[in-house]
């Protein structure tokens, strides 16, 4: 009887942990939490809600090609320009760069500055949708 109870408890525990780990799409940012999403999730958010698309590459990269509607704040100017260009710290901000390195750093910096709904969706190299430019 003890073995049956032990097996039952193990099965129940396993089911609990598996259900907690199941992916259901991007969770809302919990203010202060870094969240990485993929391009498809970012595109879905752009189409279904009011978001700010933030490009953190250089001005030259931005002029060459960008996602429609994106605003530019180069990663090295985030701390100086974010509060002027992004006054609503509760707005949903989708951040990208070229490959994902700068977008992660910029996303983390925004979170440290008090922005609550920041999502890093990596690089424009992984963006399979329309772009302005080349």
Image (spheres, rainbow, N blue to C red):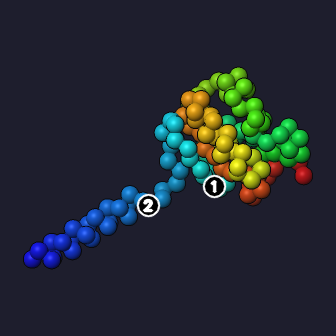
Can you identify the residue that label 2 sits on?
22
Which residue shows up at 11% across the image and 74% down it?
A: 2
Crowd tier of the residue under label 1, counting other residues whose Cα lies within 10 Å: few below 14, some 14–19, many 20 or above? some
Nearer to the camera, 40 or 73: 73
Q: Is residue 23 above or below residue 109?
A: below
- Residue shown at 81% from the left, 45% from the top: 66
Of residues 58 and 28, the one nearer the viewer is: 58
Give the residue pinned by disc 1. 38
Percent x, y of residue 25: 52, 54
x and y percentages locating residue 19 in the rendered image: 37, 61
Q: Secondary structure at mark 1?
A: loop
Residue 50's image quarter?
top right
Where on the picture, by quarter, is residue 127? bottom right
The location of residue 43, given as percent across then percent down, is 66, 50
- Residue at the location (75% across, 41% down)? 55
Residue 95 in percent (x, y) is at 68, 42
């Amino acid at each position: 009887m003890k073995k049956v109870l032990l097996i039952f408890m193990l099965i129940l525990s396993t089911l609990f942990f598996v259900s907690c780990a199941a992916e259901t799409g991007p969770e809302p940012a919990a203010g202060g939490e870094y969240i990485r999403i993929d391009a498809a999730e970012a595109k879905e958010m752009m189409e279904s809600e009011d978001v700010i698309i933030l490009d953190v590459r250089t001005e030259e990269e931005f002029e060459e090609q960008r996602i429609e509607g994106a605003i530019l704040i180069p990663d090295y100017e985030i701390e100086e320009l974010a509060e002027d260009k992004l006054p609503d710290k509760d707005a949903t901000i989708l951040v990208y760069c070229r490959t994902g390195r700068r977008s992660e750093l910029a996303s983390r910096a925004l979170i440290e500055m008090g922005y609550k709904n920041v999502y890093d969706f990596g690089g424009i190299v992984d963006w399979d949708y329309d772009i302005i430019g080349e």
